[in-house]
């Protein structure tokens, strides 16, 4: 009888221990916080010369929103900032985008992803293109 009682006690203990470990699959989240970090959107850029002009092509999973440009932040939505030779930012929502005011010689093009409210996603690429004109 004691062996059955001891076996039952050990079995209950093991089940309780297993049950405790299964709760490790869940993450405790404090009120007002998110259980996961906001996912950064992807970015791939390409420059193409065509008939003496340069066009910027962008591939991203960011939802580029012309309608919400400058509006409230919505995660996963926004627009693209383009800087030519560290000049003034160009807010871009359609592609391909023609790059203007390129200088003779090496030009640096920076492309960065931003929320609707212009806060950065922290995703950018910098490229160079040589102009002979």
Image (tube, rainbow, N blue to C red):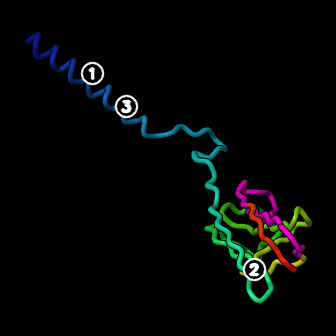
Which mark is in front, 3 or 1? Answer: 3
Earlier in the chain: of badge 2 and badge 1, it is 1
In-front residue for pair 36/132: 132
User: Residue, x 80% and y 71% (percent of image)?
Assistant: 130
Query: In this image, 31 relative to 79: left or right?
Result: left
Q: Quadrant of residue 18?
A: top left
Judge the density around disc 1: few (<14), some (14-19), many (≥20) Cα neighbours within 10 Å: few
Earlier in the chain: of badge 3 and badge 1, it is 1
Residue 15 on image: x %, y %? 26, 28
Contact between labelled residues 1 and 3, with CB atoms less than 8 Å apart? no
Residue 39 on image: x %, y %? 61, 55
Q: Which residue is mark 1?
A: 13
| In magenta stretch: residue 74 | no
Pick the quarter of the image with the C terminus. Answer: bottom right
Q: Residue furthest top?
A: 2
Q: Which residue is mark 3?
A: 21
Q: Which residues are magenta?
A: 102-125
In-front residue for pair 114/37: 114
Which mark is in front, 2 or 1? Answer: 2
What is the distance, in whole Å, between disc 2 and disc 3 at their CAs? Answer: 56 Å
Residue 5 on image: x %, y %? 15, 15
Element type where label 1 sits in the image: helix
Check residue 55 in the rendering and tell me which mark sits there, or answer none.
2
In-front residue for pair 15/55: 55
């Amino acid at each position: 009888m004691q062996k059955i009682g001891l076996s039952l006690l050990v079995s209950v203990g093991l089940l309780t221990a297993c049950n405790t470990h299964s709760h490790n699959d869940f993450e405790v989240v404090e009120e007002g916080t998110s259980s996961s970090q906001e996912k950064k959107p992807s970015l791939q850029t390409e420059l193409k010369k065509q008939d003496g002009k340069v066009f910027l092509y962008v591939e991203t999973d960011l939802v580029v929103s012309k309608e919400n440009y400058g509006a409230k932040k919505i995660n996963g939505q926004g627009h693209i900032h383009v800087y030519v030779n560290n000049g003034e930012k160009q807010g871009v929502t359609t592609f391909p985008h023609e790059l203007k005011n390129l200088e003779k010689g090496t030009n640096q093009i920076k492309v960065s992803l931003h929320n609707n409210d212009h806060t950065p996603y922290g995703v950018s690429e910098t490229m160079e293109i040589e102009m002979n004109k």
